[in-house]
Image (spheres, rainbow, N blue to C red):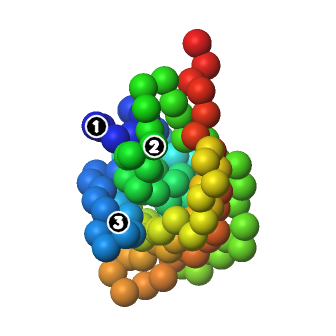
Amino acid sequence: MNILPHRDAMLLLDEAESRDGAAVGRYHVRGDEFFLQGHFPGHPVVPGVILCEILAQSACVLMQDVMEEGKLPVYTGLNNVKFRAPVKPGDTVEARCHIKKAKHPFYFAEGTIMVGEKLCVSAEFSFAVTEAAL
């Protein structure tokens, strides 16, 4: 909460850290999240867009130095996104990502989401650090 501007119900990380130039974020899927309520009744699966958001929030750990008061990181693109395995209640996801290129205010990253040893998502993404709307 000290790094990310997100709050309930869109704060999707339980913990995050920077390790050897890479961001590592974790989230435990409890099963009562708003995004599971209708996706899918009786067979809940975390939506891909939520998994992509977990990647982006994890990357924010690497942005601490450029994030100032009144600034927000916003998605500008997603490329080569591949969903390889479903994420379900009871799973703990680990997002790992790193910045490939930066030309402030634009940042280009790539990352993965794993559950244990299972690769669930891989993606390239970009975002910009922008002025927060008043």
Q: Which residue has dot 3 on it?
A: 24
Where is residue 65 shown, x and y percent of the image?
A: 39, 46
How crowded pointer 1 is (Cα within 10 Å; few <14, some 14-19, many 20+) is rated as few
Horizontal side of residue 54 vs 134, given as left or right: left
- Please name the residue shown 57% across and 70% down the image: 100
Q: Which residue has dot 2 on it?
A: 66
Identify whether 65 is placed above or below 121: above
- Mark 3 residue type: Val
Quarter placement of the N terminus = top left
Q: Gap between marks 2 and 3, in whole Å?
A: 18 Å
Pick the front one: 8 or 86: 8
- Please name the residue shown 41% across and 56% down the image: 62
Q: Quadrant of residue 80?
A: bottom right
How crowded pointer 3 is (Cα within 10 Å; few <14, some 14-19, many 20+) is rated as many
SS under mark 3: strand
- Give the total number of marks visible in the rendering: 3
**Residue 2's mark?**
1
Q: In the image as oriented, which residue stretches furthest toward the bottom? A: 117
Pick the front one: 11 or 125: 125
SS under mark 2: loop
Lower position in the chain sequence, tag 3 or tag 1: 1
Where is residue 99 shown, x and y percent of the image?
A: 52, 65
Lower position in the chain sequence, tag 2 or tag 1: 1
Where is residue 102 shown, x and y percent of the image?
A: 59, 59
Q: Label 1 near label 2: C-beta < 8 Å? A: no
Q: In the image as oriented, which residue stretches furthest toward the front? A: 103
